[in-house]
Amino acid sequence: MNPFKSNRFARRHQLRLAIENLESRQLLAAGPYAPAANEVGSTAIDRESPAIVGWATGVAEYNAGAEVDAVWQDSSKALGPAEGQSGSIVSLGRSGTLTLTFDDPIRDGLGFDFAVFENSFSDTFLELGYVEVSSDGVNFVRFESDSRSDSAVSAFGSIDPTNLNNLAGKYRGGFGTPFDLQELRGSAGLDVTAITHVKLVDIFGDGSSLDGQGDPIYDPTPTVGSAGLDVDGVAVLHAKETGSATVDFESLGGTLGASNFSNQAPDGFAEDELLLNNDYDDLYGSWQGWSISKATDTGTAGFSNQYSAFTGEGHDGSEAYAVGFYSEFAEAENRPTIQLDPEVGSQFDSLWITNTTYTALSMSEGDQFAKKFGGTSGTDPDFFEVDIHGLNAAGDSIGIVTVALADFRFANSADDFIVDEWVHVDLSSLQNAQALQFQVRSSDVGDFGINTPTYFAVDDVVLRRPQVALDLADTDLLESESMTGRVSRPTLDSSSPMTVSIANSDSSLVNLPAQITIPAGTDYAEFTISTINDDLAGPDRQISLTATADLQAPRIRELNVLDDDATGLAFSTNSIQLTEGESATTLTLRRNDLDISAPLAVTLSVTPESRLNYPASVSFAAGQREISVTVSITDDAKYSPTQTTELVASADGRTDSVVAVELLDDDLRALTATGPAASLDEANPDQTITAIIRRNDASLDDPMTVSLTNPNPSLLTLPSSVVIPSGFDSVEVTIGVLANEILNPGSNFTVVATHANATNAEFDVSVTDDEEPTFDLALLDSNGNTLDEVTEGQAVRLSVTRPAQTSTNPSL
């Protein structure tokens, strides 16, 4: 276990595991689906969630159903951020519909992709609606819904949100019901990488409307005044965001070599995701569509100078540009057309256009085929215009942007002009076009069509490229955890592999692959982001992940790495053993401050107090992360049982570090004795002497009972046991003598002191005897009987006996 890890994060982790367990067992609610907002397991999206990247920006269609007062029919109330207030809504009415659009299309990303906000005042008064999406505003696909409410609901009745799935209005006001476009992948006519429209359809909750399984849907019915689904807003969680990119034709210009133009490209001129068509006739050496040029001649008139821009250079001083030639009689596919590669998913944003020298001089001076613009008087209402048609994938026009390259129609001739500089053309109205087709119109028209040379030059086509679709499961990542990331294709085309590179702004904080490849036939690839789980305590930090891919705009995602370490101290180990008599042990103490530029004083203490020797304080020098702490055990003759003590390191503003120290003694528990300084004299029976019994316990907290053996109870008096009191290491033993008439066998007697858990001790007692040696004489007959008298001539035996306690060997 890392000593620096905070308990609050441990508790959070345990809580999360408990929640996941409950969710998996579906114990959180009555139905099988997510519960109300702010409850464990809810999928509700707070209107202030950082996951929201945009809101609905336009109303494509609003059809109010019955029972909606005029005050609730302002469809603009559904635009922009949800307000979470009951009055800031548009009501759909019974079975009414509302179709919303978005500046940036919604795309399928990791998890939910958008959320619908209703205005319910409670978690159970829920007015419901179907949700449909479209990528063209024409073909809509509905999310499959499920309603498990099994009976009708009165006008003010309640619905359990755990019985609802994929129905708008599941959550109370301020919380959106989320939807995942992944569920609709593969639907005919739907591009889940670019959803442009969301349609909401009110459900008249009397059971006549059915869910995806064909079961009746019930919600509070009937309601009036603001009947039906009340829409507060639709939030975007994953947008198809774009970045600007310019195709400048310099790569094509680099292929020209020594030539200053090329008018031949059987497959067209391709640069990045743009393809410029070219039709070259080998027989006549003529062409139509596009050429690539670096020509700079601004003074030569006539057909021989058909490749020069009148500016003498490309836009912004560049070398290469494209020259378009339009023939009124050409087939549509041979008109100058710039086509996007559909696999890339880019959109047209703008371009720069100007006249060619050939066309400009023809208009300003006239030539053998064309008139001078303005005529002799200079007031002829002449014009030369280029119509840029936006074409969809089917080749149908979706809009036109017109650019005047010459205009003499002004009332004041001083305002007449022939363009002689690069002109910026806004193509945002054609952003959904897959191709741009250029057609020329002129006021100078003859029997064979336009007399004015129908040439023009184009450069720096600005595109809105889709940003790399990089998604993270969350914006925050706890240091000890990991999360899932995903990269997705910008379009539905998955015919070839796609590689995404991800630059990590701080690889010391997180790990993730530097490259992810989405295999052919696969829409996205997921990967794992994990933290570098160190023990350094510091503030939460933010890193940037920048995803790049060929022909896509970079995408930068910010990720907050939440530190889970408490600022503190840590010993290099949790426990050690010290044995008396062995060498000292050195511990390493570490501080985990992210910034160690300042010194730090540390106090050391021990609980409980013991024989451990340690410094009272140590200090970290500035810039020092680790220091050594030497500890040892006092070597003495005292006996101590094995003891565990805690060495605590403390410093201001930091968590303590504790190491358990087990102290092992090399001394046996033993008793020792000091014998009496004097001897006893049997002739003085009132005399006593003392001996001292000692213990070698280091701790004197408990008393100790010592047993004593009396070597001669008939002579010596002493207790059978003594108690060494608590707080003392010794006790005196009083010894006395008994007067007897027995000649003692000796003068020194050994007393043994014993304790079950200690080695024995001995001391000697000396006694002076007051008896002299004596003999008993007796006459015995042949049977051993004592005789008081004998008869003359009788045979007897003489018995000589010494006292039993006599230890000497007297002789007779």
Image (cartoon, rainbow, N blue to C red):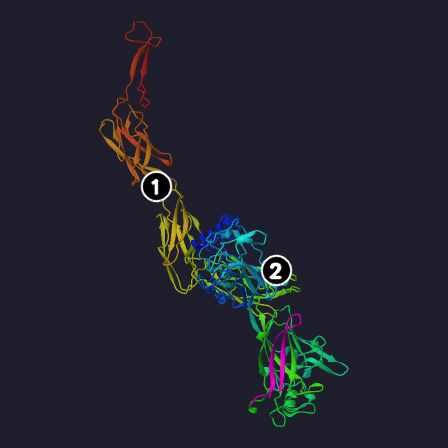
Magenta region: 383-411
> Is the stretch drawn in magenta largely helix, strand or loop?
strand
Query: Separation of disc 1 and disc 2 at Cα?
Result: 82 Å
Residue at horizontal 60 percent and vertical 59 percent from the top: 184
For the residue labelled by badge 2, is the local secondary structure a helix, a strand or a loop? loop
Q: Farthest right residue? A: 283
Q: Amino acid at mark 1?
A: Asp
Residue at horizontal 32 percent and vertical 24 percent from the top: 808
Residue at horizontal 65 percent and vertical 90 percent from the top: 362
Q: Amino acid at mark 2?
A: Arg
Indicate the position of residue 464 as horizontal and vertical percent values.
Answer: 58, 72
In the picture shown, does residue 537 fall above or below 712?
A: below
In magenta segment, residue 342: no
As drawn, is 457 to the left or to the right of 32? right
**Residue 697 - label:** 1
Q: Is residue 111 something that shows in the picture?
A: no
Indicate the position of residue 783 as horizontal and vertical percent values.
Answer: 35, 8
For the residue labelled by badge 1, is the local secondary structure a helix, a strand or a loop? loop
Q: What residue is shown with label 2?
A: 185
For marks 1 and 2 on the same chain, the one whose residue lies earlier in the sequence: 2
Nearest to the observer: residue 741 or residue 783: 741
Indicate the position of residue 738 as horizontal and vertical percent values.
Answer: 26, 26
In the picture shown, does residue 209 fall above or below 544?
A: above
